[in-house]
Image: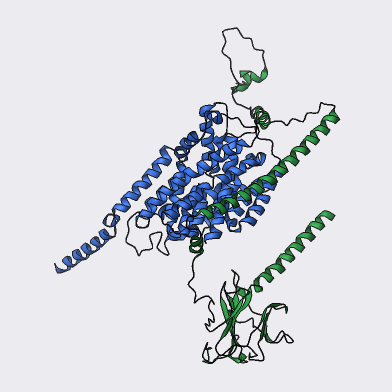
Amino acid sequence: MEQSSGFFSFLLENLSQFIAYTGFANVTWGHGIMILIALAFIALAIIKEYEPLLLVPIGFGIILGNIPFVPGFQTGIYEEGSVLNYLYFGVIKGVYPPLIFLGIGAMTDFSALISNPKLILIGAAAQLGIFGAYMAALYFGFTAEEAGAIGIIGGADGPTAIFLSSRLAPELLGAVAISAYSYMALVPVIQPPIMRILTTKKERVIRMKPPRQVTKMEKILFPIIGVLLTTFIVPSGLPLLGMLFFGNLLKESTVTKRLADTARGPMIDIVTILIGLTVGASTQATTFLTPKSVFIFILGAISFIIATFGGVMFVKIFNIFLKEGNKMNPLIGNAGVSAVPDSARISQMVGLEYDKTNHLLMHAMGPNVAGVIGSAVAAGILLSFLY
Amino acid sequence: MMRKLTAVLILSIGVFIATIDATAQNVSSLRINEAMLFNTDNYVDNFGQRSPWIEIMNIGYNSVNIANCYLTNDLNEPKKYKIPSGDPKSEIQARQFMVFFADNKTEHGTQHLNFTLDSTHRFIALLSSDGTIIDSVTLPLLELNQVYNRMPDGSPSWEKSFFSTPNSTNEGRFEKTSSGEAFLAFDPSGIIMAIIAMAVVFAALIVLYRIFRTIGKINQRSAQLKSAKFAKEQGLPVTSQEVAGEVYAAISVALYLYETDTHDQESTIITIQRVSRLYSPWSSKIYGLRQLPHEQRRRN
């Protein structure tokens, strides 16, 4: 009898310990909110098809990161030795973003840019969002490093945002990355109203000259000259710019098809899964649900608005100096933010609303890819000043 | 053949130069960073003794192996003390330090030199394995326990100080402000950063724009010349107008459709008119059906 009561008390003790270790015993409101946000991300990705390749891994990562657990069992992403911690290494050390840039380079066709090089300048103008948000963040009391990490959201480039914030303000990485990817997914909602407000009906139907034929030699020269020029000016942007242009050379040289196929195919897919999942998992309620994160989201929205404004207004001002027939449609200005190819698609969609036969996609791809270069250069500048 | 040989030669020279440069990059990152002439109340070695010491710093961002380099206090005898290669401690990590004791007691270890420093021997030189001087300094006459050090670490400017920091940074006594804080002190609103950064982004992309505009023009010009030459040869009218990309796209699509226009099922037309089809053995059903074996009977 005594033996059986001992067994039952042992069983009870273990059961109560098991219950204490379950997620139900450790759940907080924060976890619940984060899981709801994760479900919203997944729903947006599946139902609305907003950036599904990113939002599904990030959304699921948020769920993984917000499963309540008792620390000390090498489970959580911030616990040394845990599997998620090992995978997160690629984020905090900035390994994944350059690999993604390699893939982006291998899948990007810079022909639109080469055939009409003035489109490059729109990619520069749209970086205004980064520095507008930087100033706003300083105004709200963030440190210079934090402001730099927040500002880069305006570049609308997830890998660049992760790369820079992992260097300047690692504690804000989760919030910056989630904010950047959320707004990139919401480009179809944020940009069109700003584009409509800033342009007249006459401007929206401007037809641009069809792009000229680009030779293979020009396509090969572009990554070589591009990397030499940009990295000599901003060496701190080397990991991103170097990989971007290297990937592009793999593609355009046409003699390294296998390497280019790997970079733009399986490799970028693997890295996207890892970066999405780990960035999502890094948003544990305890570290993520802070007033700072709310501010980061507000500033992220501001930076996207300023970036779109910068791009569209630049085209309008540039048009003053261009001859009739050479003018650019200001609806491609929004594509200067580097959310490739979503923002270029927005130019096309809004353009078609006003002229069903005016296809702007090809023209918008120019500033769009220039935006990728511009935001990487901007990240390099922030890094060299603030790191 | 000649071309191939030239290519191989250029490649080999390139690799050779790169290798030399890489080696030079390594030991050239070493600097004499701090030294003490008269040590009476300062740094103590592993044997509890005080002697003049020399601190070497690796100013690079990679570890450097100092083995096989030389230290001397007399340029007439440049290879006075060879740093042995067998000691694993001879690896200096990035931005780290190594202290050598000028006590003429090599039996105390690899970091004890075979010469001393005093008021008449104040010259120190660090040489690479091939005898090239990496760094040298002549110490001024120092007071007891006073050091002569670079400030900041690894910089060309030297100063005397009673704040000795063997095996550590010379800037330790100063409160270090981050780059961000320093920038913020000059630019609290961020406007200077915005202007500078936008100017740099624009400058980089404007140069890229100018280069590709020029390349584009050269290309267009050469294409026009080619087409003019071709037209002249063929006796065709010369046209300077470039064929638009849309035309190329339309031709490409047409060619693609034509070339991929293979299908299993032929297009059919339903009609009420009488259609007569010519007989062709290729479409004859007889040849498509399995023939039943004929029964053969033996006739007796």
Return the x and y of residue A139 as percentages of the image width and height. Answer: 43, 54
The quadrant holding residue A9 is bottom left
Q: Which chain is blue?
A: A
Give the mark count.
Answer: 0
Return the x and y of residue B164 as percentages of the image width and height. Answer: 53, 83
Q: Residue at x 62, y 33 (%)?
A: A327
Q: Is residue A245 above or below residue B283?
A: below
Residue B1 visible in the snapshot: no
Q: Nearer the viewer, residue A317 or A244?
A: A317
Return the x and y of residue A163 as percentages of the image width and height. Answer: 51, 55
Quadrant (top left, top right, bottom left, bottom right) of the N terminus of chain A:
bottom left
Residue B267 visible in the snapshot: yes
Q: Which chain is green?
A: B
Q: Is residue A364 above or below residue A221?
A: above
Apparent side of residue B153 relative to residue A154 in the rendered image (left or right): right
Q: Nearer the viewer, residue B41 or B100?
A: B41
Q: Is residue B212 above or below residue B48?
A: above
Apparent side of residue B129 relative to residue A208 in the rendered image (left or right): right
The quadrant holding residue B280 is top right
